[in-house]
Amino acid sequence: MPWEILHVDFLTLLDSLEDSSVDLIITDPPYKSLEKHRAVGTTTRLKNWFPVIENSRLDDMLRAFSRVLRKNSHCYTFCDYTTQDYLKEACSRVGLTWWDPIIWDKETQGMGYHYRRQHEYICFLEKGKRRLRNLGLGSVLRARRIFHGYPTEKPVKLLRTLVEQSSSSGELVVDPFCGSGSTGEAAVGLGRNFIGGDIQEKAILLSRSRLEEGGWEAQERA
């Protein structure tokens, strides 16, 4: 299936898309709260740090999500417990419905000073009403975290579940913070079209290489 990776800011990518043209968004923005974890030493594995987006830009991000998403579609955005509150409040202002978060069980413990955290939140947002493919799936998804990969890289196994649950073959999946390109691999591998973007040149090179090595041909929009 065709895919495209763009070296652009997330809002530039979203602004380039037509209204109601996207079937699914799956993304992991570099939230401001990451700096808090970094400051206390709980993100030492993120050696190659990247710019974060301020909480003040979350409204713009979700407003752009709402504009480009088709009616009756989903959005999944990874976050921590701090940013969850900002996203939930912003959803009510941009026409997206907030549902209970999904828990990603990483199957291994992370760093910490109290109980060692081994989970991450996936905010589940909806525009209109779209039925999940498998209504029997629980809200805790288990997939072993990636070690020694791109910073904050998500396992393809986890992303495939989200793609399968909320899109169909031939539909368009978008990730405006594509990082390692794992969302693209999950989407294109399941027969979806994909558009990704990132401001980090390393991410762009890695994402493009990942999809090219998978044998999927890039295609630019007219």
Image: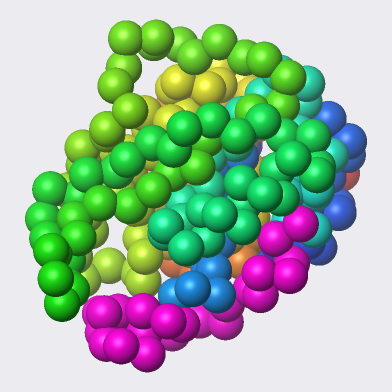
Dividing the picture into quadrants, the one containing residue 117 is bottom left
Q: Is residue 50 magenta?
A: yes
Q: Is residue 88 magenta?
A: no
Dividing the picture into quadrants, the one containing residue 23 is top right
Give percent across and percent down for residue 182: 41, 50
Q: Quadrant of the N terminus?
A: top right
Dividing the picture into quadrants, the one containing residue 11 is bottom right
Compared with residue 100, is residue 72 higher up or lower down, i.e. above or below? above
Residue 141 appears in the rendering: yes
Give percent across and percent down for residue 27: 54, 50
With 49 as the anchor, is 109 left or right in this view?
Answer: left
With 207 as the anchor, is 42 left or right in this view?
Answer: left
With 156 as the anchor, is 219 left or right in this view?
Answer: right
Please name whichever residue, 215 or 56, is drawn nearer the observer in this view of the structure: 56
Q: For the point 44% across and 22% down, which residue is it?
A: 164
Compared with residue 60, is residue 198 higher up or lower down, i.e. above or below? below
Please name whichever residue, 203 or 50, is drawn nearer the observer in this view of the structure: 50
Residue 207 appears in the rendering: no
Q: Quadrant of the C terminus?
A: top right
Q: For the point 53% across and 69% down, which residue is it?
A: 30
Q: For the point 31% across and 17% down, which residue is it?
A: 137
Q: Which residues are drawn in magenta?
A: 35-59
Magenta stretch: helix, strand or loop mostly: loop
Give percent across and percent down for residue 62: 73, 49
Compared with residue 113, is residue 149 higher up or lower down, i.e. above or below? above
Give percent across and percent down for residue 173: 61, 36
